[in-house]
Image (cartoon, grey):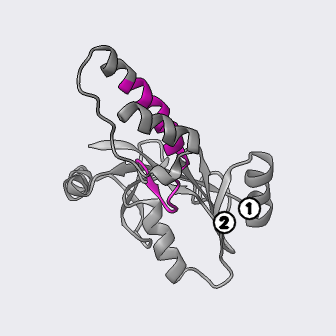
Amino acid sequence: MINGINHITISVKNIDTAFSFYKDILKLKPIMKSNRSAYFYAGKTWIALDKREPYNSSENYAHICFNISKGHFKKFVEGIRKNNIKEWQKNETEGDSLYILDDSGNKLEVHFSTLRKRIKYGKKHYDKGTQWFSVNKVHRSGTHSLKNNVNWLRAVPQSLIGIVHFFAALRKPRYIIFYNASLLTKTERFRVTFLNG
């Protein structure tokens, strides 16, 4: 039922110095910064920084969040409550979440939503001082694009040309998958037209 890590939240004492550390020292990709929180990408992983009082090793907000599908969430919650697992807070954020403690007292969350939905929610509800940063891609517990990034298509024709050569060598009909030719260089357009002719 659990199918991956949704995000990791790290409690910090000072959001400004923490933001600088994660952005400038660790070189994570910033997504958002408010007066008490910040979001980053570490590769495809959503990292959240959170400043709340009190800050100490046992009472801060730091927790690991596990991803779950919408269809499994209700049944999962029922199973947790049936087993009398202690909950450490009620959900006050966008998306469905259950906050529980493991048997050692570690704080865990099981969450159904995506960073994209959180960004959309945050832009409507977070404080006016929140800064939002340009991000090319927003990964769900998988991926999604915020911008139409088509640069990768430039590599496609070379692969297709190889496929055309292969079929030509076998003396079989040659096919080229349709793509937006305006994205190709003049040389690539000539080669594809020649081979497909």
- The rendered magenta stretch, by its main secondary structure, is classed as helix
Q: Amino acid at mark 1?
A: Lys
Residue found 24% across the figure and 52% down from its top: 76
Q: Earlier in the sequence, mark 2 or mark 1?
A: 1
Q: Position of residue 50 (x, y in %)?
A: 63, 63
Q: Is residue 64 visible?
A: no
User: In the depicted view, which residue is nearer to us: 188 or 179?
Assistant: 188
Q: Secondary structure at mark 1?
A: loop
User: In the depicted view, which residue is nearer to us: 92 or 115?
Assistant: 115
User: In the depicted view, which residue is nearer to us: 80 or 124?
Assistant: 124
* CA distance for labels 2 and 1: 6 Å
- The magenta stretch is 142-164
Q: Secondary structure at mark 2?
A: loop
Q: Is residue 96 above or below residue 197?
A: below
Residue at the top extreme, as displayed? 170
Q: Is residue 104 above or below residue 30?
A: above
Q: Position of residue 31 (x, y in %)?
A: 62, 62
Residue found 74% across the figure and 60% down from its top: 19
Residue labelled with disc 1: 13
Q: Is residue 155 above or below residue 20?
A: above
Residue at the bottom extreme, as displayed? 128
Q: Position of residue 102 (x, y in %)?
A: 42, 45
Residue labelled with disc 2: 51
Q: Is residue 129 visible?
A: yes
Q: Is residue 162 magenta?
A: yes
Is there a contact, CB below 8 Å, between mark 2 and mark 1?
A: yes
Q: Amino acid at mark 2?
A: Lys
Q: How many marks?
A: 2
Q: Position of residue 191 (x, y in %)?
A: 49, 34
Quadrant assignment for the N terminus = top left
